[in-house]
Image (cartoon, rainbow, N blue to C red):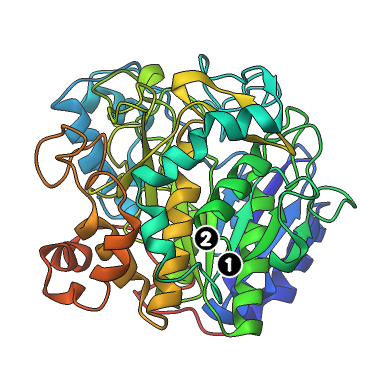
Amino acid sequence: MPEFVVQGRSADAETMAQGVASLGGRVTRSLQNLEQVSGAAVLLVETPAAVTDKELKALPGVKIVEGQYYHPFYQLPPLVPPKDMLALALQLLPPQVFKALHPDTLGNILGARVQDAGALEEFDVRRTPFGVPGLSLGPEVGRGTFEQRGDLARMLDLVHAPQAQHMNQGQGAIIAIVDSGVDRGVIPQQNLLSTWSDDDDDNGHGGDNGHGGMVAAIALAAAPRASFIVAKPATNERGAMRSLSTLSALDYLAGKALELRTPIIANLSWGIYGTKNLILPCDVFITRTVRLLDQKGLVMTSWAVGNNREVAGPNTISGYCMSTSKWSTSAGAVGRDLRPQPYSSLGGQCSPGHPVVAAPTFGILPWGNGYRDFGELGGGTSSAAPQVSGALALMMTQYPGRSFSFYRAALRASANNMILGQPGPYNPLTGAGLLQMDRAIQMVPGIQTNPWWAFELAIPSSIPVLGGEESGGVLKG
């Protein structure tokens, strides 16, 4: 059955549910933690195939509908400047203006045919684990070979993890791995805080996909005394995480952060596959949720910027919409030679300044509960993000209680593009430069005098906060 998110005021939740039932549908979940924080009722619903988003939107109490019939996925041929810049500018329009643009109008503006192809382009994660052709699993190797080669240790050396770990090792910080699950034994029991699974009864442990194990092992190596949450969204028949289930994972993390009264770093090494420009309107549910959780100081999201540069074309903005908002932290990827990996996505779709920083990936890396040789291309931007997540854990341990803007600005201020041979303080391939974990920690207390702080505050965005879509205020129950 088609799935949708419907949103309205808390006071209208029961009325909304009755309306869904009148169409032959049902509420599968109420995201109560997000409702508590935002004042907006958020319901996940299933409906008969004949029901459309327009019928749902006409129901009493329903203000916003997103889902299978709502998300336009704009698949364009590779564009070149200045059309890339024009595409980015279109994303910064007020949401109601952007949504009023007919696909043909967008096509005329950009000089390319815009095709509505549904919310996700279909691909099989089991055959394409990193979302794009050309990045594949290498041969399995043993632990001895992994340790002898020392590629992960070299990666961490390049981002100054050993120097940072002399200050602290992440004790007290919490990293959530929102991914395909993490195989048993990857995270030691003393580091495992909790698990959540929307997929089956395996308590968040991995199945036949080792991606989550790779991400968790790298984050653990960067912050060896951090506490970890494993969150495993449900997957579709092709092995890809279902978008509505990832919202449930964020709802769970919001509840944990409220319960523990401690911010959580959510590592999100996933995205949407395809040649991208105008992927989705920037104010889709997940980006509105990311803004809410960031501004409330509950969940700081650490994203892989994407692996789409070669697919989309070398000059095309190809960062994911959800990973490149003003309230997102994103990581690009460089290789052993500290040059940008050819696949690492370019720039930010929904806000300038992305990726925030870059991190290295190459060689033999953990995968599941074993190891694989990924060669010089490494493990995609998926393996760069957990290095940033680890850095954030150390930053929050050393200097707790700051707004997330402090940590993002410090990441940028401490990074180095000269090491990477990239010009300027910012480059759309590498962001502010190579992650430097020790310097990032040191930059936190004085960051408000740094130019990157002014950038963090001034960066433009048209994305409203969840619950504040109407009249610029929070929807009240």
Q: Indicate the amino acid at tag 2.
A: Ala
In the rendered structure, the answer to whether residue 423 lies left or right of residue 409 reads left
Do callouts 2 and 1 mark residues in contact (Cβ within 8 Å)? yes
Res. 282 visible in picture: no
- Tell me residue 72's x, y (percent): 48, 36
Q: Which mark is residue 226?
A: 1
Q: Which residue is mark 2?
A: 223
Percent position (x, y) of residue 401?
41, 83
Can I make out residue 306 in this image? yes
> Would you say 126 lies left or right of 291 here?
right
Q: Nearer the viewer, residue 110 or 290?
A: 290
Residue at 15%, 34% in the rendered image: 422
Question: As displayed, is residue 145 above or below residue 300?
Answer: above
Q: Residue drawn at (46%, 46%), measured in percent from left and top?
A: 385
Q: Dot 1 surroundings within 10 Å: few (below 14), some, or many (20 or more)?
A: many
Q: For the residue labelled by badge 1, is the local secondary structure a helix, a strand or a loop?
A: loop
Crowd class of label 2 (few under 14; some 14 to 19; many from 20; radius 10 Å)? many
Question: What residue appears at the point 23 percent right and 48 percent down from the top-left corner?
Answer: 352
Q: Residue furthest right?
A: 201
The residue lying toward the viewer, choosing from 189 and 206, is 189
x 79%, y 32%: residue: 208
Quadrant where the image shows the N terminus: top right
